[in-house]
Amino acid sequence: MKVIIAGGGTGGHLFPGIAVAERLRKEGIKDILFIGTANGIEARVIPREGYRIEFIRSSGLVGKSILKTLQGLLNIFLSITDSIKIIRSCRPDAVIGVGGYASFAPVFVSSFFGIPTVILEQNSIPGLTNRVLSRFASAVCITYHESFNFFPSRKTILTGNPIRARILEGSREGGMRLFGLSPQKYTVFIFGGSSGAKNINRAVMGSLPYLADLKEDLQFLHQTGDSDYEQVKEAYRKYSMSGTVAPFIYQMPEAYAVADLIISRAGATTLAEITALGKAAILIPYPYAAQRHQEFNAKKLHDMGAAIMILEKELTGERLAREIKRLLKDESLRKDLEKNSRAFGRPDATGAVVDLIKTMVNKKRSKNDKA
């Protein structure tokens, strides 16, 4: 069985695709090819993960200048040409679109070749690419019930957002040793994406004076990004707060495992990981995400009692400290958040997507055999 996984551009699109690839490999399916663009995150990540990748000429259309929009329109035709060449050479049994503009041409072309195609939608409000592709794809896998409103009901399935298996396998004890943390203290894990989030970092630094009375009970694990690292580290030192500060944390399974509370953005993959683990969280959605999807994602969890949401325009050090204190002191509230988060999570999402793909391929083969 040969599988193509197309798309990327951001980790939120790419990592669910990697999760599916890992599961396929685990089940003995090793002929997996990624398709993306040379300037997307996939160009750096996929070779490190040990998969092959082919590049197509593709670029976005939404929110671009007139010149870049015209270039994007030209690239649609170029990406279709590139995809035809790749698909004819590879002859895949299934093609999975994980979102992002690089997923459009491979899924579109494959649908016309009669190849089973699946698209993954991570957000409650889908982007333009997946809305268009849903008309051609064999199936649409969604994360939120609200997404049913945007796709053909007959081919739309609520699977959840695939996450990497190793995210679920972190050791709390091992993580405490790795990050030099105390098992006796309440641990707050803060991250704002791979390059950090300046406004979250600023709010955390502003919260420290208000948390001074809890320094014996509280510790932090904070991924800052490169630009704010020294400043944030100095703030923890100034207020004598315990913890570990790093520009980037590679050992995310262990970081999640040690966390009693997570403070983060509200990207779809992050939320899939948090809820699969059943962690209490304070979500600060990125306000400039396309179609405000992070805000809608966070509000969904907030309304379910599965997370606390603070909009960035309402974010201050004092407000953040107040929420941290409330969760540290109110065990009942913390347990409710964890329970509701776990109820929303779908740790089996990756398996559900892979089972769907295998079923579609087997049906196609059976139909061809009868013909």
Image (cartoon, rainbow, N blue to C red):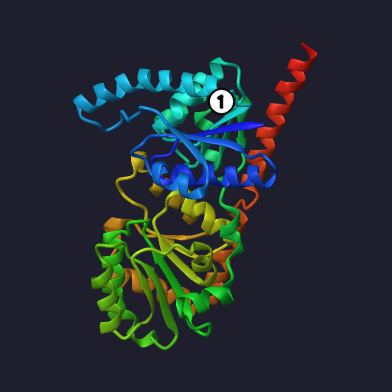
User: Which percent across, then down, holds residue 361?
Assistant: 69, 27
Vertical arrangement, residue 353 with respect to residue 283, above or below: above
Q: Residue furthest top?
A: 371
Residue occupying image coordinates x 58% and y 43%:
21
User: Which percent across, then down, holds residue 61?
Assistant: 31, 28
User: Which percent across, then down, holds residue 275?
Assistant: 55, 57
Residue occupying image coordinates x 20% and y 29%:
65
Dot 1 amino acid type: Cys
Corner quadrant of residue 103:
top left
Mark 1 residue element = helix
Can residue 132 be seen from the camera position used here?
A: no
| Residue designated by label 1 | 90
User: Which percent across, then down, holds residue 114?
Assistant: 60, 17
The quarter of the picture where the C terminus appears is top right
Q: Say left or right for 358 vs 305.
A: right
Can residue 143 be seen from the camera position used here?
A: yes
Vertical arrangement, residue 267 with respect to residue 4, above or below: below
Residue occupying image coordinates x 44% and y 47%:
45
**Total numbered labels:** 1
Q: Residue furthest right?
A: 370
Observer-nearest of 83 and 196: 83
Corner quadrant of residue 331:
bottom right
The quarter of the picture where the N terminus appears is top right
Residue occupying image coordinates x 53% and y 22%:
89
Observer-nearest of 303 and 271: 271
